[in-house]
Amino acid sequence: MDKPAQPTYRIADLPASDRPRERLAQLGPQALSSAELIAILLRVGVSGENAVQVGQRLLQKFNGLSGLHRAAFDELCAQHGIGEAKAAQIKAAIELGRRLPLESPAARPSINSPADAAALVRYEMSGLEKEQMRVMLLDTRNHVLDIVEVARGSLNSAHVRVGEIFTPAVRRNAAAIIVVHNHPSGDPAPSPDDAAITHAIVQAGKLLDIEVLDHIVIGQGQFVSLKERGLGFS
């Protein structure tokens, strides 16, 4: 009588055509699932799970790559089979991917619409648990020089200092900026404070000869351009 098949816990037990590293070498990284890419970083699994299954568990636990990116280092280390070394590898890989578009002038994205700006940060900012304000620094051709965090917490006119918003732009000699912040509630509808802050930022930009192209609010899967709605730009 045949013995029941044993569950596969090791990548080495998989057929060569199903192993992530071999698939990456043959088909390129774009052909692999996120779980398979994480498996390559992990290299080995744990008792009862191969590396791909561990990757799938992490993605489910943290709600995808954006959740892994937001997760605290200690929280990631606490997951079964993930110690400091593996957590560091995952965090480093995700951060390298985030930095890649800004690495070289030729690869820097160009902002031609509010959607272009939102696309650069929506992946990360839509799931933040607290409000955060960032400033996109642009050159004269609207290429992104950098994206800098300038405020965190309750973002109302009493807590956001306009001077701090322009400090990185002055240091990098940026020609223009786009201000972006998130609403943790998931609803990107601008508040009266959002409009008031925008008005103050636009006026300061005129004094500094740094154009404020837009202020974008990021929600869950949505965004709003205050400039398109005429809030703070009149």
Image (cartoon, helix red, strand yellow):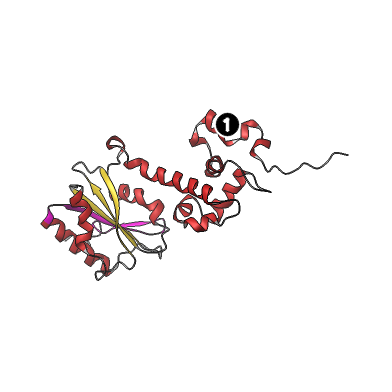
Residue range corresponding to the magenta coloring: 208-228
Lateral position of residue 204 relative to residue 38, left or right: left
Q: Which residue is mark 1?
A: 22
Instruction: Residue type at mark 1: give it.
Output: Glu
Residue at 29% over, 53% down: 148
- The residue lying furthest to the top in this view is 26
SS at mark 1 in the image: helix
- In the displayed structure, 97 sits above or below 194; it is above
Residue at 60% over, 43% down: 52
Q: Is residue 126 magenta?
A: no
Which residue is more in the foreground, 211 or 42? 42
Label 1 crowd (10 A; few <14 / some 14-19 / many >=20): few
Which residue is more in the foreground, 108 or 122? 108
Residue at 34% over, 56% down: 223
Residue 180: image quadrant is: bottom left
- The residue lying furthest to the front in this view is 84
Report x, y in % for residue 136. 27, 51
Q: Is residue 221 visible?
A: yes
Residue 108: image quadrant is: top left
Report x, y in % for residue 60. 56, 53
- The residue lying furthest to the right in this view is 1
Lateral position of residue 10 relative to residue 92, left or right: right
Report x, y in % for residue 120. 35, 48
Q: Quadrant of the N terminus?
A: top right
